[in-house]
Image (cartoon, rainbow, N blue to C red):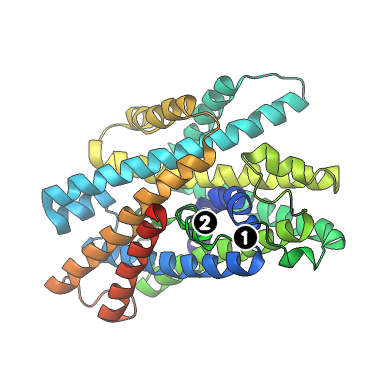
Amino acid sequence: MNTKLLGSSLIISGTALGAGMLAIPMVLAQFGLLHGTLLMLLIYAGTTYAALLLLEATIKTGDGLGLNSIARMVLGKSGQIVSNALLYALLICLLMAYILGAADFVIQILGSVGVSLTAVQSQILFTLVAGAVVAPGTTLIDRLNRIFFLVMLLSLASSLLLLAPNLSFESLFQVSNSDQIALIKTSAVLFTSFGFMVVIPSLVAYNQEATDKQLRNMVIIGSTIPLICYLCWLFAVVGNLQLDQLGNFHNVSDLMRAFEAHSPWISGILSVFTGLALLTSFFGVAMALFHQNTDTFRQNKFVTYLITFIAPLIGALLAAEQFLSILSYAGIILVFLAVFVPLLLVYKLREREVSSDRYSAEGGRAMLIITLLFGVFLLVSQII
């Protein structure tokens, strides 16, 4: 795999990590390591295969197209409208969540150097500056993301090493909430934590010279890195915090304060990690929305920049302290967009035998049925 494809895998990983590294301890730690791990593995397998279905549809309809054009070609005008509505709702929800989470860090960082900002000011500042990085294109995001991802991995490794001496093996088996129905209801948030599918059309366009096999490996590597990080992070949280702390996280600051008793160094390092995780996720999702708006509206970059970031910023300003709630809403939308839409696209393309010599996700019709059941499970988890 060349550096461009590796960078694309890291964009996939970075897009997923922002939500998950913050949300997973908040929702899973209370149910214990065993049950949390099993559910996470199930979600990982389902989301990775759904992403491969979207990759198949993207490749077979023509490299470089956004979901807007793919849906129009395969599903017609009505399918295009529905897909666009779902995509915009999802991307705006995710950007709202990342703006809320990142603004909290902006306040902390600038406050440490004597600059005081309100929540509204920090949200506006972060959106304007981070959005300006997205506008030039995927190449800049790729280069920045490689640097940020390396720092993130070093921060995570350092945090795990600092937490290791305080790790309690008895704590690893503690469960503060044994309600299995409540555990299943976290599936939408977990699914959002692997919600990188939206960047696939953009990355296929960015890697037009890559083979189908290389693109497939790009997706699998990109989805596996977050799984490893999530499991290590969940292991550290459950093994280091007390039973009464698990399940009481409501925002990023709560999570950071929970580790302050261990060492101020750990809190600082984790702040760096989670801040960069939010930033890389913002870049990935914003890149997907920017690419979608370019494909849909055909405007210059400045107009596309305004279209891309105004709605998420307004939404974030109106939805203070709703980080987890927004991720839950995004998870429900993502089920339709990232499972059912790719499933329908691939079914139609295979039925018509469009570009049958190009990449097809493994498993045939049986895996399509399993993916359908996986999507139904995610929906049921929200209404039980």
* Residue 187 position in % (x across, y down): 47, 58
What residue would you read off at disc 2?
Answer: 182
Within-10-Å neighbours for mark 2: few <14, some 14–19, many 20+: some
Report the side of 25 relative to 361 (left or right): right
Within-10-Å neighbours for mark 1: few <14, some 14–19, many 20+: many
Label 2 amino acid?
Ala
* Residue 173 position in % (x across, y down): 72, 67
Question: Secondary structure beneath disc 1?
Answer: helix
In this orientation, which residue lies closer to the viewer: 384 or 242? 384
Mark drawn on residue 21 = none
Q: Which residue is found at the position 76% from the left and 46% from the top?
A: 269
Q: Which residue is found at the position 48% from the left and 25% from the top?
A: 317
Label 1 amino acid?
Phe
Check the image and report above or below for 73 versus 96.
below
* Residue 58 position in % (x across, y down): 28, 61
Report the side of 338 relative to 190 (left or right): left
In this orientation, which residue lies closer to the viewer: 212 or 335? 335
Quick check: marks 1 and 2 in contact, CB under 8 Å? yes
What residue would you read off at disc 1?
Answer: 31
In this orientation, which residue lies closer to the viewer: 243 or 112? 243
